Image (cartoon, rainbow, N blue to C red):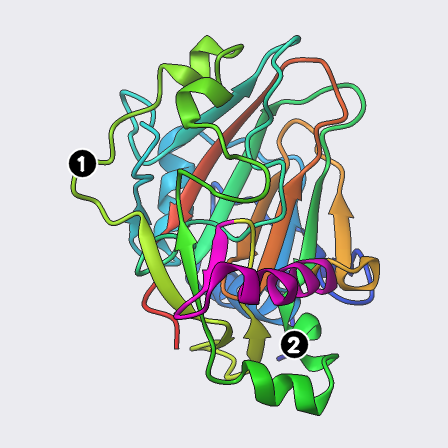
């Protein structure tokens, strides 16, 4: 596709691009069509110097699909579509500090995630992204054959392995603002089984689909699965698959959870306030 309404600046050789020349508060259909194509091409896109009111951010998100509501965390009172993520100086836990793909524990995981920066630290607090197309494509053919029909078992809480074993209330013990957002999931499904290799419904490309929510390979004994899960987790976040984004006030990132993992870096001790919206997805295949 020829981009005529937007300018694109790739941030690495493997994924990610900054989109320039766009005011997201005044977006026409032709410009959105180019943004959507750039998103599919680069998997995660970034915008600088945006001035968005909550309803304007919500309107932009709805262009990609229906809003997904987090089963564990409450959104803003006036705009429940938006989850406000706040970290204060001294908080011990950082939201999203392990490599993952959003809502993988849901039978229909989030299609996309949009994060908009209101307050950022003077240094640190970057977010890393990893290209899961490349994670799959660089595997050997015999390994691809082994993984082809495997499925993963994923959870949203009660982790048996990896970071996050403690429950959410304990995780946010030093952050009362985030702890107050926690809600009981009720009858919302927070466990799921998904293909380890998924096909992107829009691009048709295959990607590795794994992250911190993955606890086991479906039908396997835990000790049988752990070695392979550990290998794939490490492989999927190799440095050559990644890019890194430095936040500024007014920055907005939009990533494709169907082919990208991400990680929030916890290398700061200042206030950070972000507005997150997730877009509903469908069942992986």
Q: Nearer the viewer, residue 251 or 283?
A: 283
- Which residue occupies 52% across, 80% down? 203
Tell whether 138 sits left or right of 184: right
Image quarter hosting the C terminus:
bottom left
Tell whether 7 sits left or right of 223: right
Location of residue 41 in the rendering, given as x and y in whole percent from the top left corner: 63, 71
Tag 2's secondary structure? helix
Instruction: Determine crowd level at label 1: few under 14, some 14-19, many 20+ residues with C-alpha closer than 10 A.
Output: few
Q: Nearer the viewer, residue 14 or 172?
A: 172
Image quarter hosting the N terminus:
bottom right
246 shown above or below 220: above
- Which residue occupies 48% across, 12% down? 173
Location of residue 21 in the rendering, given as x and y in whole percent from the top left corner: 66, 51
Q: Nearer the viewer, residue 120 or 31?
A: 120
Q: Quadrant of residue 119?
A: top right
Location of residue 220 in the rendering, given as x and y in whole percent from the top left corner: 45, 69
- Which residue occupies 70% across, 28% down? 266
**Residue 4 seen by the camera:** no
Tell whether 154 sits left or right of 241: left
272 shown above or below 205: above
Residue 136 got which mark? Answer: 2
Q: Which residue is mark 1?
A: 186
Location of residue 43 in the rendering, given as x and y in whole percent from the top left corner: 61, 63
Instruction: Determine crowd level at label 2: few under 14, some 14-19, many 20+ residues with C-alpha closer than 10 A.
Output: many
Tell whether 253 sits left or right of 126: left
244 shown above or below 154: above
- The magenta stretch is 213-235
**Residue 85 seen by the camera:** yes
Q: Is residue 105 magenta?
A: no
Whichever of labels 1 and 2 marks the residue nearer the N terminus, that label is 2
Majority secondary structure in the magenta region: helix
């Amino acid at each position: 596709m020829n981009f005529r309404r937007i300018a694109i600046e790739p941030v690495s050789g493997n994924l990610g691009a900054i989109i320039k020349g766009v005011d997201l508060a005044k977006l026409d259909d032709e410009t959105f069509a180019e943004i959507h194509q750039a998103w599919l091409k680069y998997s995660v896109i970034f915008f600088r110097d945006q001035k968005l009111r909550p309803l304007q951010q919500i309107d932009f998100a709805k262009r990609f699909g229906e809003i997904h509501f987090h089963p564990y965390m409450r959104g803003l009172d006036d705009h429940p579509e938006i989850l406000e993520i706040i970290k204060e100086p001294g908080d011990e836990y950082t939201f999203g500090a392990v490599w993952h793909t959003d809502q993988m524990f849901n039978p229909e995981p989030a299609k996309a995630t949009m994060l908009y920066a209101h307050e950022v630290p003077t240094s640190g607090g970057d977010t890393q992204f990893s290209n899961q197309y490349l994670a799959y494509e660089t595997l050997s053919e015999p390994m691809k054959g082994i993984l082809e029909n495997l499925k993963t078992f994923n959870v949203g809480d009660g982790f048996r392995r990896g970071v996050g074993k403690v429950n959410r209330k304990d995780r946010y013990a030093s952050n009362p603002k985030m702890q107050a957002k926690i809600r009981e999931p009720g009858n919302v499904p927070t466990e799921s089984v998904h293909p380890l290799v998924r096909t992107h419904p829009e691009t048709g490309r295959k990607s590795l689909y794994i992250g911190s929510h993955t606890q086991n390979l479906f039908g396997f004994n835990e000790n049988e699965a752990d070695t392979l899960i550990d290998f794939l987790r490490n492989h999927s976040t190799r440095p050559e698959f990644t890019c890194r984004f430095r936040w500024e006030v007014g920055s907005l990132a939009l990533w494709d959870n169907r082919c990208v993992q991400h990680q929030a870096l916890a290398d700061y001790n200042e206030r950070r306030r972000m507005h997150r919206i997730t877009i509903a997805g469908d069942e992986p295949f």
